[in-house]
């Protein structure tokens, strides 16, 4: 199956509409079956990060553990599941590393530690609903996007809030270190920070805050995990371009490798399969993939 690329904005609109039509859009799933490439001998230039990872057979990937459908790890599970995880598996497999093997370490990253973890070498790649911004690109490398979504509002099912207009001057929860909390303030709401989004969900459920806000794809996952208790409201008021983080930012070869793997996944249908096995598990229509940024 060959998929046509489209503008990022259209991909975001398509994603929001398709997920909104699906009650359990974010309920996760076991993911698709990704097989490791068989021969990496001479595949990567000497001295590149890819050659080092392939030769060692080991890589550490940072992802979220608390976002159903994107990056979620049950306490009893050996590894996380979700769309971010599936894209990471495609990258890992291209290095001739079995994504299900002990050669892959899945490191939990929250919004506030993604740049430090990359800088410190604690993780090699970050795929953790990582919105691409110029501020972040001044610190770490980011490429993609492999998903485009927009920020919305999550409230209790019985709330009268219909969008950000009803929350002007009111406290709205979002994660520390995220672009979402910056957008909350820009849109006239009062940011109430939490260590992670799962804490924001708890704060909404227990009435500590009226609402939380982040990417609509994340919110729909939480709403699906709490049927009859939470709902997503309002139109998107931002464009979030989700990409892959790496370090250092001037590793052009790494950027081009990431883009090449993602583009191949667009072309051969692997990207669509990853979506359908995670965010689309409940029957949501698969959107067209967004165009990739060029590597500087």
Image: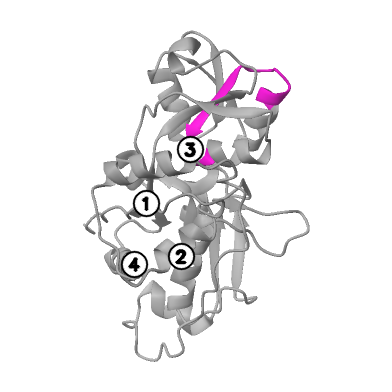
Does 80 sit left or right of 34 as displayed?
Answer: right
Q: Which residues are magenta?
A: 203-218
Quadrant in the picture for the C terminus: bottom left
Name the residue tied to disc 3.
20
Does 114 sit left or right of 159 as displayed?
Answer: left
From mark 3 to mark 4, how far is it between C-alphas? 35 Å
Quadrant in the picture for the N terminus: bottom left
Q: Residues within 10 Å of mark 4 (few under 14, many from 20)?
A: many
Q: Residues within 10 Å of mark 3 (few under 14, many from 20)?
A: some
Is residue 207 covered in magenta?
A: yes
From mark 2 to mark 1, how far is it between C-alphas? 11 Å
Indicate whether 52 appears above or below 135: below
Residue 34 percent across, percent down from the top left: 51, 74
Q: How is the image coloured?
A: one colour
Callout 2: SS: helix
- Camera-side residue of 95 and 22: 22
Q: Which mark is residue 287?
A: 1
Q: Is residue 277 visible?
A: yes
Image quadrant where residue 150 sits: top left
| Disc 3 versus disc 4: nearer the observer | 3
Of marks 3 and 1, which one's residue comes earlier in the chain?
3
Residue furthest to the right: 76
Callout 4: SS: helix
Callout 1: SS: loop
| Disc 2 versus disc 4: nearer the observer | 2
From mark 3 to mark 2, how far is it between C-alphas? 19 Å
Of marks 2 and 1, which one's residue comes earlier in the chain?
2
Name the residue tied to disc 2.
273
Q: Which mark is residue 254?
A: 4
Residue 235 percent across, percent down from the top left: 40, 26
From mark 1 to mark 4, how far is it between C-alphas? 27 Å
């Amino acid at each position: 199956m060959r998929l046509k690329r489209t503008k990022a904005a259209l991909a975001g609109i398509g994603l929001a509409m398709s997920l909104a039509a699906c009650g359990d859009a974010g309920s996760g799933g076991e993911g698709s079956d990704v097989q490791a490439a068989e021969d990496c001998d001479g595949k990567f230039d000497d001295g590149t990060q890819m050659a080092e990872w392939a030769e060692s057979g080991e890589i550490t990937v940072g992802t979220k553990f608390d976002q159903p459908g994107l990056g979620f790890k049950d306490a009893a599970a050996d590894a996380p599941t979700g769309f971010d995880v599936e894209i990471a598996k495609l990258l890992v497999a291209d290095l001739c590393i079995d994504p299900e093997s002990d050669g892959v370490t899945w490191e939990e990253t929250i919004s506030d530690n993604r740049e430090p973890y990359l800088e410190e070498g604690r993780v090699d790649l970050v795929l953790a609903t990582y919105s691409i911004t110029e501020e972040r690109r001044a610190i770490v490398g980011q490429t993609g996007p492999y998903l485009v979504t927009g920020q919305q509002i999550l409230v209790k099912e019985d709330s009268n809030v219909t969008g950000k207009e009803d929350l002007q001057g009111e406290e709205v929860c979002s994660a520390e270190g995220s672009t979402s909390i910056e957008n909350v303030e820009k849109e006239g709401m009062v940011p109430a920070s939490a260590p992670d989004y799962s804490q924001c969900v708890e704060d909404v459920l227990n009435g500590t805050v009226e609402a939380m806000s982040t990417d609509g794809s994340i919110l729909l996952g939480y709403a699906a995990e709490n049927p009859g208790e939470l709902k997503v409201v309002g139109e998107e008021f931002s464009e979030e371009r989700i990409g892959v983080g790496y370090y250092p930012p001037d590793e052009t070869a790494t950027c081009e490798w990431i883009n090449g793997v993602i583009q191949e996944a667009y072309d051969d249908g692997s990207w669509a399969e990853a979506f359908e096995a995670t965010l689309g598990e409940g029957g949501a229509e698969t959107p067209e993939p967004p165009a990739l940024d060029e590597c500087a």
